[in-house]
Image (cartoon, grey):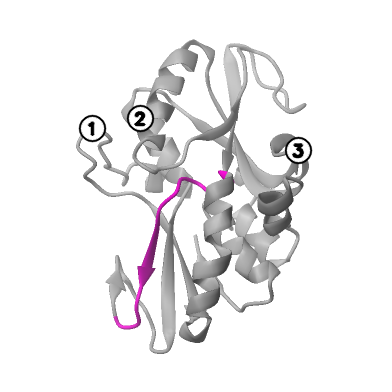
Amino acid sequence: SKIDDMTYQMSFNPETAEGSVLVNMSLVNKKYREEVGTLIPPVFASGLAHGSLMALVDEGEQVGDNIIPEGMVGLGTVCSITYNGALLQAGIPVTSVFGGLLEIHDRAPDRFTAVIRYDGTSLDPLEIYITSRMTSTGDAARDGNGQIGASFREIPASAREHAIDTDSRFTARGLGGFLKLGYPSQSLLDIPVGDGRMGLVVAGGLNATALLVEEGIPIESKA
């Protein structure tokens, strides 16, 4: 699958802080540069983005195969698929089940209100929700109540402690971890998992730029 292919391209080593990660590239008119610097930091501070890092790329500069067009700035946010690569590097197989709208209540994950399975679409579900203006990331970041993009994944139940250790090493480097981790063979946020499996919920990397869309700022994102 596309997700599996991208996962194997991630080579970041948390011990040396070197290597490649997968990013979402968002383009915004450079006249909104000041708004970018004002609106996005609270989302990172709330822990509702994927990690705490973002690259600001000027027009004419290149990221991967992408050259930032004239009059635009690029916003590179860590893609949550990077987390799949982190788990895989640690010897933990991970299955991405669906992307959805996650309701945040009192600053904690509460329930999924809409989902799109990854095996049922060739598009990024979270990108669909954001461009459709179905998120309220700003409210979630400011007041602790709102809807953000998130994905649901499964890992083997036996890997729970190993996953927690891997998560701590990557979050210490500013890369994203999980929002919520389940227990063996138990439902997580009312989402059932298979026997010998457990669920984890990961915030979407595009959450960092979703607030721009919510504020009416034109943006083009490529997951």
Q: Which residue: 33% across, 25% down? A: 90
Q: Is residue 91 left or right of residue 95?
A: left
**Which of the two labelled residues, at mark 2 and mark 1, occupies the earlier sequence position?**
1
* Residue occupied by mark 3: 106
User: In the rendered image of this protein, does residue 147 appear above or below residue 98?
Assistant: below
Give the dominant element type of the magenta stretch: helix, strand or loop.
Answer: loop
The numbered mark, 2 or 3, whose residue comes first in the sequence reads 3
Of all residues, the one furthest to the bottom in this rendering is: 70
Q: Position of residue 88 (x, y in %)?
A: 37, 30
Q: Which residues are magenta?
A: 47-60
50 within the magenta span: yes
Q: Dot 2: few (<14), some (14–19), or many (≥20) neighbours within 10 Å?
A: some
Q: Which mark is residue 169?
A: 2
In the drawing, what numbered circle is on residue 123? none
Residue type, mark 2 in image: Arg
Q: As shown in the figure, which amino acid type bears the numbered disc 3? A: Asp
Q: Which residue is mark 1?
A: 15
Distance from disc 1 to disc 3, alpha carbons, whole Å, reads 34 Å
Cβ atoms at labels 2 and 3 below 8 Å apart: no
Please say whether residue 91 is one of the residues in the magenta stretch. no
| Residue 177 in sight from this viewpoint | yes
Q: Is residue 1 visible?
A: no
| Mark whose residue sits in front, 1 or 3 | 3
Count neighbours of disc 1 (C-alpha within 10 A) and say few if under 14, some if 14 to 19, many if 20 or more.
few
